[in-house]
Amino acid sequence: MKRKHFIVILLNVCIAFGYYLGNLSANETHLSSDLHNIIPICLKMDDPTMFPHDTFANDLENVKYYTPFYIETLRFFANFTDGNYVQALNVLTFICHILFGLLWYFLLFRITKNFWIALFVSVLMRGIVWIPGLEYWGISDLWSLLPRVVYYAIMPLPFLILHFQNHKKTYLAAFLIGFIFNFHPITGLSGILLFIGFLLLHSYFDERRWKAIFSKQNMLSLLLIFLGMLPFFFAYLGNVSAKADYDLALYKEALALKYDSFITEPTTFWKQWFTLKYGAYFSVVIAFIMLAYLKGTAKDRLRSKYIIGLAALLFILPNLAAYVELAINATFDLNIRMSFQLVRMQKLLILAVYFAIAFMLDIFYRNELFKKVFPYVFGGFFLMLIVSKYDTFDNIPLVSNDLIRRVLPNSLSVGSVVNGQESDDLNEVLIYIRENVPKDAILFAPDIGRSGGQRSVVLDSKGANMLIEGNPKRYIAWYQDYQNYNKLSRKASNQFLRDYGVEYVLIYIDLPDFELIHQKGKWRLYDTGVRK
């Protein structure tokens, strides 16, 4: 069996190296919009004089609450890449690909004791699954390596350490599930809910009495989880105020521009799960539960109870959070701004699907014919992963889905998929900005002008997201300016930019009112004449 584990290690290292080598020449255009907000924070911490007039990066106080563990990890790796944050991200992606593949494999192997099932499901879990709330599960290229994905990669570790007959291991696992929460608090809360739910359900099922869930071990585990979470609480509570000392109506109006109505009407969020797409996913869970009761053993039925209990916990509590928040705000005249984040904790519901697949395969594996055939099934599955990016499969259901196409790097595939904006033309203009535009210049540009151009960007929508929790007053001011700008005609809006102090415009349309100073492909850089 050790030889088989070595095969898993080799496979995951190959996948990780495939992504790493394929991104040695990557640039900011390969990244997702969230990373265009993260990299400027790192740059600002490295050089406080950067972004003096930016929408959010003008002052680090605006973003001190934002995932400091992820930020500091990325900054650490930048020490080895000469400050190149794209390559620092490449190193972190390489590490996370190995951790993700191996930790999930060993957790699944620990549960099923089956090499092929653990390998199959751990590889399947890599694919990108888009989830309600603009969320996703999985790990892929540079664009995907957000704080939540670092959390996905290390999430199995506490569950691997957990041992109910060994108090020290249980306590270490409890502290660790709290500690890794700091890499992405929203996803981390989901993991903590699963850990606590698993702890309590095990206590109940083990002794068949409710009193067992209040054992000394469970209570001490809860305390250790909280201790692990403390760094985030200190950072968040010290930098985010719930005091409503601004126009709440205007704030909610500004928030509605960014997020759907699930903030004030949470039912609109959970209803997204009840669509055909997610019904197809969760039909696997229903199939496993039915199979467990019709053909399974007592162990299979117990597994189904764990899945039902933990899924219910992940579904109900995050949805309740929005109602609780509304009640607290109304009672104490506060503006706690967490429910629009907390409802996104439901993302880990997707794990129910993967574990249902593993448990269902475990039942099938008791059939001798299935046991002989399944290794060949895995071989066919892996072949599909290799060829899925080929143009021929563009319109074939499942094969053309990100769940399949985003597992392997392009270097290990037939065909390729595009990541981010991937524009050599845009990258050339960004390099020009870094080398020729004054450091204190003000740009009107997409968010990549901030991360790739390394200059202050104003009036952009993505950057304003960082102010929602960090600086509500500045967020409201941005909203008013943004709305005023978008109401104007083209000529009037150009003058608005001048009056706003914008010195350069990075855009892909013709603006004859301004002086064109650099162009590559469709991307154009204009001088508004304000600095002259």
Image (spheres, rainbow, N blue to C red):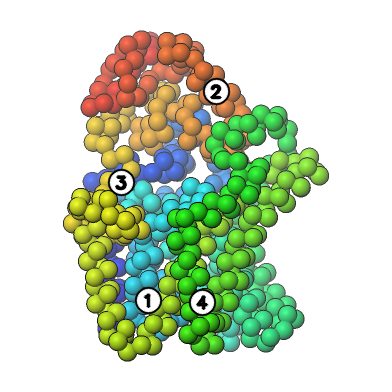
Rendered image quadrant of residue 406: bottom left
Badge 1 amino acid? Ala
Is the C-beta separation of discs 3 and 1 under 8 Å? no
The residue positioned 63% from the left and 56% from the top of the image is: 318
- Residue 103: x and y, percent? 41, 71
For label 3, the SS is loop
Q: Nearer the viewer, residue 426 or 280?
A: 280
| Vertical comparison of 327 with 313: above or below | above
Q: Residues within 10 Å of mark 2 (few under 14, many from 20)?
A: few
CA gap, disc 2 to disc 3?
Answer: 31 Å
Please report the residue visible at 38 percent of the width from the left and 14 percent of the height from the top: 528
Where is mark 3, residue-wise?
Answer: 419
Tag 2 residue: 483
The residue carrying mark 1 is 118
196, above or below 531, in the image: below
Left or right placement of residue 21 versus residue 165 in this view:
left
Q: Is residue 338 left or right of residue 372?
A: right
The three-letter code of the residue at mark 2 reads Gln
Q: Quadrant of residue 508?
A: top left
Q: Nearer the viewer, mark 4 or mark 2?
A: 4
Neighbour class for label 3 at 10 Å: few (<14), some, many (≥20)? some
